[in-house]
Each structure stands twice: as C-alpha cells, then as structure tokens.
Image (cartoon, rainbow, N blue to C red):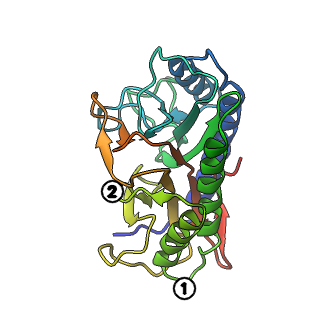
Amino acid sequence: MIRIKTKDEIDLMRQGGKILASVLQELAKNVKPGATTKSLDELAEALIYMQGAMPGFKGFDGYPAALCTSINEEIVHALPSTRKLKDGDIIGLDLGVIWPPENCDSCALSKGCGGQRGLFTDAALTVAVGKVSPEAKKIIAAAKGALAAAIDKIKPGRKLSEASAAIEEYVKKQGFLVVRELVGHGVGYELHEEPEIPNYASSQFKDVILKEGMTLAIEPMISAGSHKIKRSKDKFGYLTEDDSLSAHFEHTVVVTKNGCEVLTKI
C-alpha cells in the first residue's frame, strides 16, 4: 500500500531533508585522497546528532553504520572501513535521516519527540576524489542528469513508469547502462515503502498513477559496463559484476499539486 503523507508530515520530512542535505554537502567537502571511509561515516553520524536528528541507516537490516560509502565498482551499501580514498577514485555517499528523533530507549540524544513519529528521508550523490578520468566525470554527470530527468516527470496524474523510462533513456544516450536488480522506493514512515521504482521501463513492476502527497526516493544507479551485479564479501554491498565503474544519485521528493518538490536538495 502506498501511504500518502499529510501536510504536517511533509513539513517534517522537509525539515529532515534539509538536515540530510547539509550533512551530505559537508561530507562532499571532506572527500579527498587519504581520507578513510570510516572517517566520513563518523563525521556523518556526528553531524546528524548535532542537528538533533538520528541516522536512518544504522541498525536497518543489521547495517552497522550511518553512511554507505561505495567506491568505483561498488554500486550501493558498501560499509565504511579503514580503506583510504585514492586520487582518481569516485565515491557514492548514501545517507538516511530520521526527523524528529523517536521517543524511545534507543534514542542517542536521550530525549524524544513528544510523541511524533520519526520520518525518513534518503539521498545520495557521487563525488570525484582528486583528479579523475574523463570516464569517471562522464558517469557522474550521467547519473546526476538521469535523476533530474526522472524528477521532471513527477507530477500528479502521470505514471511513475514515465520517470523510470526517462532514467533509462537518459543513461543510454550517455553510453551507460542502468542497474536493473536494484530500485528506488517510497519513503517516509519507513526507510523502504511501496512503490518500487525501477530505473528502466518494465512491465514486471506495478505501475502507479502519481498522487499529491506521495513521497518517493528516486535513485538512478548506473554502470559503465554490465548492468548485472554481485554481492560484496560482507553481504552488505553490491558491485558491478564486471567491476566496471558505477555512479549513484538520489533525492527524496514529494508529489505536489502542480508537480514535485525535492526535499533533500543540496
């Protein structure tokens, strides 16, 4: 079931989205050769708590970190570690935030939200580390452009499949392929809600007529080689099957009366 959000809930997601966007922006500034992905995760968690929110990923399906740090052929969900970034790498930074913080024993702030349930927002961007190859620059631009193309299709009364088709069309024109086994999703009350949002046109997924109040996490994941994937050894991350470069961008958006609003705009 797709869950429509109220105006008050959307306003809370807007607040959480601003926190998330500010944290991602700061993380991007700290992406440089020699930095470890663990240090980026620690910074992300500290910044989230400083703004009174909670990490959305930590503990989700056993994920032990606040931030996903996916390098080069890693598509999404790679665990932070002591691995150091190198000049020429590209890194996907994927982050979730809960706002307001839940009033429960697990709240790291030791204070609650007065009974208001915490709402999730979710966003990602891919960042160049130092001087990168022309291919790396191109795939980053292609993933970012595909997200913009999809968002342009989000309007009440339109089919969600139009956004999926726009992603695939844009990516193909740039000479890349979309990852088919991973999808975007609804977001808000939970990190992953209905509907599933593939990054390609497919009759295998139930199509949806967009309605005002729907909140969606749209996330093109693209590959410079094969669209097929494999799991990392730790079973959290996903990589391109042929170890080709991958890029990932994501925004949480809400369907509005006349179009859509990006809630995690950086």
Q: Is residue 166 left or right of residue 202?
A: right
Residue 229's place in the image compared with 88, above or below, is below
Q: Is residue 20 left or right of residue 187?
A: right
Task: Please report the residue visible at 38 percent of the width from the left and 64 percent of the height from the top.
Answer: 196
Residue 259's place in the image compared with 64, above or below, is below
Q: Is residue 24 left or right of residue 54?
A: right
The amino acid type of the residue labelled 1 equals Gly
**Where's residue 125, x and y in %?**
60, 44
Nearer the observer, 160 or 70: 70
Can see residue 12? no
Of mark 2 and mark 1, the one earlier in the sequence is 1
Nearer the observer, 122 or 110: 122
Q: Which residue is mark 1?
A: 157
Tag 2's secondary structure? loop
The amino acid type of the residue labelled 2 equals Glu
Task: Please report the residue visible at 52 percent of the width from the left and 40 percent of the height from the top.
Answer: 94
**Other-residue count near label 2 (Cα within 10 Å), few / some / many at <14 / 14–19 / ≥20:** few
Q: Which residue is mark 2?
A: 181
Tag 1's secondary structure? loop
